[in-house]
Amino acid sequence: MRNDANRRGRRTAAVFATFIAGGLSAMLAGAGGPAMADGLFSHLGGSFSEKSGKFDVSRWQRSDGWKSGGHMNCSWNRANVTFEPGHLALSVTDRLSGRDRYSCGEYSTHRFYGYGSYSVSLKAVKADGVMTSVSHYTGPPFGDPWDEITFGIAGKDTSKLEISWVANGVGHRDTVVDLGFDASQGFHSYGFDWKPDGIVWTVDGKPVHRVTAKDGELPRMPGRLMLRFWSASGDTEWLRRFTYPGQPLTAQVASVSFREDPSNLSN
């Protein structure tokens, strides 16, 4: 597979900054702010493996009633996260949600997870203006520095995987990986192996991109895992203009796993 520098990296990183920090700040402000985060989300989670759409509801929550910035034309709606035979479904629909014309789906963990190997089997959506993504995030809404590890598939070209990471508030230029297949045509496994000395992103178990301390400061804070499918506002080179096709668009997640790194146990 070939890695190409993404010339849109800085702009994309800025969008994710608004998307994550702004949206979570709004969510927590409406629910008691950082104090609530301390009470509910400060505990760490261990290894887990979930498949066939049978997700542990004590581990996950459906986002509802807020959005993550002006770059989105949809708000998170719990009705857009459903359990279907063999998979979790995240949808974009024309259901009115707050002030937004469309609704979209986010499923995230209650707990924070540290160093280890993460893997998500998913089928992305091919359509201009949408993004299927997975993020590992913590930041100011939780009283932490902004650390994030992200990968996503833009609907305008589902043969590419976009990769980015943030350490202590400093975003790093995106990398675009040529997958060699169409991610909207079937399930594939996407993930990352995160250790104190580096991050290796994988596709179907094979390394596709690697960063180490020589590439810049690395994320170090445990974070929440977030599965997302959303639609964009405006007409940008990054995602293009979204046009609702008259029926729901649905990204599918077949499994999620996390294998804790032994270094977590020695901290």
Image (tube, grey):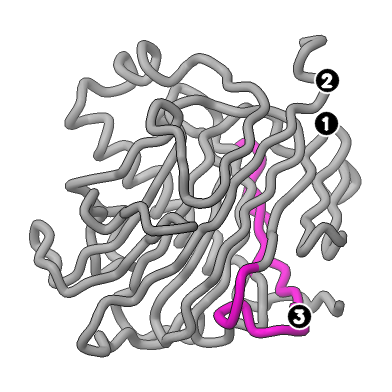
Residue closer to the observer: 35 or 156: 156
Query: What element does badge 3 sit on?
Result: strand
Q: What's the distance in space between the residues labelled 1 and 2, CA to CA?
A: 8 Å
Query: What element does badge 2 sit on?
Result: helix
- Residue 43: percent from the left, percent from the top? 51, 14
Using the image, tell me which numbered label, if any, was put on residue 178.
3
Q: How many marks?
A: 3
- Quarter residue 4 falls in: bottom right
- Which residue: 46% across, 70% down? 131
Q: Which residue is the site of mark 1?
A: 196
Q: Which residue is the site of mark 2?
A: 263
Answer with left or right where residue 138 lies relative to residue 121: left
Answer with left or right where residue 184 lies relative to residue 47: left
Specify whether residue 78 is painted magenta.
Answer: no
Crowding at dot 3, Cα within 10 Å, few <14 / some 14-19 / many 20+, comes out as: some
Answer with left or right where residue 246 lies relative to residue 84: left
- Asked if the residue under mark 2 is in contact with the one under mark 1, i.e. CB atoms within 8 Å, the reply is yes
Q: Is residue 25 above or below residue 110?
A: below
